[in-house]
Image (cartoon, grey):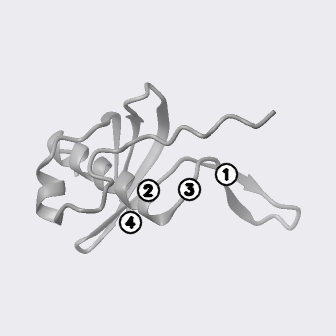
Amino acid sequence: MQPPKAIIPRWQGNEGTQTQAEHQSQQPSLKVTNWKDWNGKGSLRGSFSVTLPSGLILHDVALFGKGDARWVAMPRQRYTDKAGNTSFKTLVEFASRKVADNFRDQVLIALEGARLA
């Protein structure tokens, strides 16, 4: 018996054939809620929840920024190793850089639409 095939979500604009302007002019296919402003904490700008089209909700997604650059960090778990050093464990990751970049773009569009970024 073969394992079931993976279901890969189709994010709006992930075909790679659109220009940046076309991609940014679209409505995001996800929703941003629960914004918490963290300005003044280094490059951390805020944290929020993201609801995906599937209904999955990701909490504690973070927005970082420095100069004109902005990036999104997925939820992580903070821990202290045996030597007493603080580190973070990845809880959610993407199958490819392309998928991660598309998610980031969609989140930034949603944040801009809500006037949070």
Q: Residue at x 18, y 55 (%)?
A: 23
The correct choice, above or below, for 79 with respect to 54 in the image is below
Tag shown at residue 78: 1
Q: Residue furthest top?
A: 55
Q: Amino acid at mark 3?
A: Ala
- Say if residue 45 shows up in the picture: no
* Viewer-proximal residue among 75 and 23: 23
Q: Which residue is mark 3?
A: 95
Give the CA distance from mark 1 to mark 2. 25 Å
Q: Which residue is mark 2?
A: 99
Give the CA distance from mark 4 to mark 3. 26 Å
* Viewer-proximal residue among 35 and 55: 55
Q: Secondary structure at mark 4?
A: loop
Q: Amino acid at mark 4?
A: Ser
- Residue 2 location in percent, x, y? 76, 37
Q: Residue at x 60, y 40 (%)?
A: 6
- Residue 95 location in percent, x, y? 56, 56
Q: Which residue is mark 4?
A: 43
- Callout 4–callout 1 Cβ contact below 8 Å: no
Labels 1, 3: front one: 3
Reading the chain from its start, which is encountered first: label 1 or label 2? 1
* Label 1: how many Cα within 10 Å (few below 14, some 14–19, many 20+): few
